[in-house]
Image: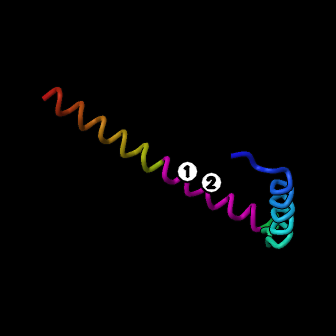
Amino acid sequence: MAVSAKKVIQFLKEVKFELKRVTWPSRKDTLAGTAVVLIIVFIAAFFLGIVDLGLSKLIKIVLRG
């Protein structure tokens, strides 16, 4: 199932054409999106850390008593 060089070249030309049509986000939009993701990750990490701490203390209490 060999792919001919002509098909590969045609595919790459189509990829180049499609990439020109893409509306890329501005630097400001990219930084804003990144900030939102980082904030949500830190909130989720904090929440999961608190839940983990609580559950580990609960398991220690159950296993001791």
Tag 1: residue type? Phe
Tag 2: residue type? Leu
63 inside magenta stretch: no
Residue 12 in percent (x, y) is at 84, 58
Q: Residue sitting at 69 percent across and 58 percent down?
A: 34
Residue 17 in percent (x, y) is at 86, 68
* Circle on res. 42: 1
Seen from the viewer's position, the closer of residues 23 and 25 is 23
Residue 64 in percent (x, y) is at 17, 26
Give the residue furthest to the top.
64
For label 2, the residue is 38
State if disc 2 and disc 1 touch (CB < 8 Å).
Answer: yes
Q: Residue sitting at 81 percent across and 62 percent down?
A: 15
Q: Identify the image quadrant of residue 28.
A: bottom right
Could you tell me which secondary element the residue under label 2 belongs to?
helix
Q: Is residue 30 left or right of residue 13?
A: left
34 inside magenta stretch: yes
Point out the image quarter for the C terminus: top left
Q: Identify the image quadrant of residue 60.
A: top left
Could you tell me which secondary element the residue under label 1 belongs to?
helix
Which region is colored magenta? Answer: 29-45
How packed is label 2: few (under 14 Cα within 10 Å), some, or many (20 or more)? few
Seen from the viewer's position, the closer of residues 13 and 26 is 13
Magenta-drawn stretch, dominant element (helix, strand or loop): helix
